[in-house]
């Protein structure tokens, strides 16, 4: 059941109902026991009375039977006694006398005491008292049906108000639970009335204690969402600004191509436009890569892939670039050392590292890319013989859009930020350090 | 008009350099704060086009530095960040004008002309000498009722001379203004342009100072 109100109503009604039913059952059992006790005593007393009337009052058996009838008449109005029947039998088995309304058949075959017999199709409870001296047997009985009726009446008398109370109780529960849940409604209203831009915390103070943990959790979520959105917003703003410069370049070159007085100038402008488009394209690709590593799909990209193969694939991809730059690219990785399910993330990181190293490397030098296992993790090490990163800039190079003093203008300022983010997503880290003998050494350390 | 362009984006820097040259300016391109400091210290530029974000520092810092040194060189900030706050910060740091990227060349040219005009206390885009009014926006001249058209290079040479009447400009200086970037300079092109100018303005308008270069004839002399 999805409604708390409905659920509480059902639970409370069910619990109340069970308690009431148990009480009714218990009452019925105890009532039945008491009724049996009381009525049995009455049977016994009546039998003794009839017997003593015959014995000590000197009444004839006939008169005594009539007295029994009288006694019944005296108690007229108490309908239970209508059901009392009395028979007086001789010990020889002849019916001496009986009260009016007594059944045709003999009430009991027992010699004395209590017994239950079926007489004329009806169950009777009978007390038999024998007097061997005066040669008679008094039997007083009442119908079992009457007894059941009595117990039923008492129980029903108790259940009837309950049946009446239950709907009342239900209405009461419905109203009070609704009232009790009003803080939830208010919280819901406060949330649903919020504009999407409002990520401020919810007020905790007026809420009941039970709701506060939820509000605190919601506020925590709101804070995280707000921080993420702020980051996104600044990233978007930054990205837009970063794109404006190449766009301005394109615009200017296009204007030059339009107003160029000679073919040489026009051709030159068109070449510049091509370069500008390439650079802008690279920038956009890097922005997309940044977004991709920041928000990777939830599921791992697929089956585990060999780290060495991935590194080799990146190197093969970048071989043309290395050729253009006149830089060697040497890969040293043993297949089967280490594998990852996050091939895309890893390749993005490696591609950026190798690209950076190639761009930084002087012509004729060689960039080395290796994969090895060290202690707890796999280490991809990309080293170049470039100018290296200055100590002042080292802490900032993984910041988004940071460009070092020696940066080539074709860079997006995102490369190392992408690597660092990928590393974090992969549960690893990026370490940058000066290389022995000159250059920079980038180590991408990933958990095994 | 000599303009210093401080821009680190290669394509944009080239575009500014070529575009301003085509618009009759004589631009010089540098791509870092360090080079800009050096250039400002050395050369007689009439205005600076300054990018905000440079690889070795902020254009704003460079600008503050410039103003602290007491320079009143007109500076036009060129930047991708053109929100209100950014513009206010830029102008307060000492920028004379502010242009957001991307922009159109004619607007940049007009603003640069306005900046230099203001710096020189002129109300119009006109340079006057010896009865000739040179319109730096239209790259054309007027003498009396006569309208004189110049090619871009003729204009560049003439404007360079008219900006500082009386001072001598060497052939090398004029070549530098004509060709910041392009094809190999043919050694006699400056002479060719001066020859054409003399044909249009009268042979005495520009004087040759043997061994030194060219200058305008004194007023009343041509």
Image (cartoon, rainbow, N blue to C red):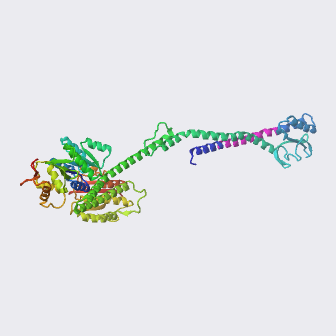
* Residue A28 belongs to magenta span: yes
Residue A98 can be seen, yes or no: yes
**Left or right: where A210 falls relative to B76:** right
Check the image and name the residue furthest to the left.
B210
**Left or right: where A155 falls relative to A86:** left
**Left or right: where A200 falls relative to B3:** right
Q: Residue at x 34, y 52 (%)?
A: A240
Q: Where does the C terminus of chain A fall, quadrant-wise?
A: bottom left
Q: How many marks?
A: 0
* Residue A37: image location, x then y, percent: 77, 39
Q: Residue at x 54, y 39 (%)?
A: A182
* Residue B164: image location, x then y, percent: 14, 48
**Left or right: where A129 falls relative to B65:** right
* Residue A208: image location, x then y, percent: 51, 38
Check the image and name the residue furthest to the front.
B145
Residue B12 image-quadrant placement:
bottom left
Front position in the image: A395 or A321: A321
Residue A328 can be seen, yes or no: no
Q: Decide whether the magenta segment is chiefly helix, strand or loop.
A: helix
Q: Is residue A231 above or below residue A321?
A: above
* Residue A407 belongs to magenta span: no
Residue A51 image-quadrant placement:
top right
Front position in the image: B136 or A99: B136
* Residue B26: image location, x then y, percent: 18, 53
Q: Is residue B86 above or below residue B26?
A: above
Residue numbers of the magenta segment: A18-44
């Amino acid at each position: 059941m999805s409604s708390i109100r409905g659920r509480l109503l059902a639970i409370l009604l069910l619990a109340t109902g069970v308690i009431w039913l148990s009480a009714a059952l218990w009452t019925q059992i105890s009532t039945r026991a008491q009724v049996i006790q009381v009525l049995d005593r009455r049977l016994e007393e009546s039998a003794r009375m009839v017997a003593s009337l015959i014995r000590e009052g000197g009444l004839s058996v006939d008169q005594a039977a009539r007295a029994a009838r009288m006694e019944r008449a005296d108690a007229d109005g108490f309908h239970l006694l209508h059901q009392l029947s009395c028979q007086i039998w001789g010990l020889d088995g002849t019916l001496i006398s009986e009260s009016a309304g007594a059944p045709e058949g003999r009430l009991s075959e027992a010699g004395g005491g209590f017994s239950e017999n079926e007489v004329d199709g009806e169950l009777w409870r009978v007390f038999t008292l024998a007097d061997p001296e005066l040669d008679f047997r008094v039997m007083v009985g009442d119908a079992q049906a009457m007894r059941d009726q009595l117990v039923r009446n008492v129980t029903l008398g108790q259940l009837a108000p309950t049946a009446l109370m239950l709907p009342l109780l239900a209405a009461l529960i419905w109203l009070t639970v609704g009232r009790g849940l009003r803080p939830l409604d208010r919280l819901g209203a406060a949330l649903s009335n919020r504009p999407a831009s409002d990520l401020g915390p919810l007020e905790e103070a007026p809420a009941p204690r039970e709701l506060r943990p939820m509000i605190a959790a919601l506020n925590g979520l709101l804070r995280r969402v707000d921080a993420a959105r702020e980051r996104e917003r600044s990233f978007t703003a930054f990205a837009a600004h970063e794109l404006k410069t190449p766009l301005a370049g394109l615009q200017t070159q296009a204007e030059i191509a339009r107003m160029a007085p000679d073919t040489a100038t026009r051709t030159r402008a068109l070449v510049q436009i091509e370069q500008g488009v390439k650079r802008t394209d690279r920038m956009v690709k890097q922005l997309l890569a940044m977004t991709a590593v920041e928000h990777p799909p939830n599921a791992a990209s697929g089956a585990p892939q060999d780290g060495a193969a991935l590194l080799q694939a990146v190197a093969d991809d970048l071989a043309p670039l290395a050729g253009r730059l006149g830089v060697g690219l040497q890969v040293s990785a043993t297949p089967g050392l280490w594998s990852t399910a996050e091939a895309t993330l890893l390749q993005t990181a490696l591609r950026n590292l190798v690209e950076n190293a190639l761009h930084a490397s002087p012509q004729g030098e060689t960039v080395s890319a290796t994969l090895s296992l060290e202690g707890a993790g796999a280490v991809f090490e990309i080293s170049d013989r470039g100018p290296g990163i200055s100590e002042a800039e080292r802490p900032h190079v993984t910041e988004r859009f940071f460009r070092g003093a020696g940066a080539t203008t074709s860079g997006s300022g995102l490369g190392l930020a992408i690597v660092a983010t990928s590393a974090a997503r992969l549960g690893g880290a990026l370490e940058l350090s000066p290389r022995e003998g000159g250059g920079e050494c980038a180590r991408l350390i990933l958990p095994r | 008009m000599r303009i210093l362009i401080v821009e680190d984006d290669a394509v944009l820097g080239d575009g500014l350099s070529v575009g301003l040259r085509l618009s009759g300016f004589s631009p010089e391109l540098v791509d870092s704060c360090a080079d800009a400091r050096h250039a400002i210290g050395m050369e007689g530029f009439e205005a600076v086009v300054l990018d905000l974000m440079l690889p070795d520092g902020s254009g704003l810092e460079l600008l503050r530095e410039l103003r602290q040194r007491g320079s009143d060189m007109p500076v036009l900030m060129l930047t991708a960040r053109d929100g209100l706050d950014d513009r206010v910060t830029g102008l307060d740091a000492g920028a004379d004008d502010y242009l957001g990227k991307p922009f159109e060349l004619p607007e940049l040219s007009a603003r640069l002309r306005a900046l230099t005009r203001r710096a020189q206390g002129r109300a119009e885009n006109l340079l006057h000498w010896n009865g000739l009014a040179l319109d730096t926006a239209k790259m054309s001249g007027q003498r009396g009722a006569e309208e004189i058209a110049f090619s871009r290079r003729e204009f560049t040479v003439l404007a360079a001379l008219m900006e500082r009447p009386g001072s001598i400009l060497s052939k090398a200086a004029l070549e530098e203004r004509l060709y910041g970037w392009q094809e190999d300079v043919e050694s006699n092109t400056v002479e060719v342009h001066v020859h054409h100018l003399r044909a249009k303005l009268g042979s005495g308008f520009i004087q040759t100072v043997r061994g030194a270069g060219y200058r305008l004839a004194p007023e009343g002399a041509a």
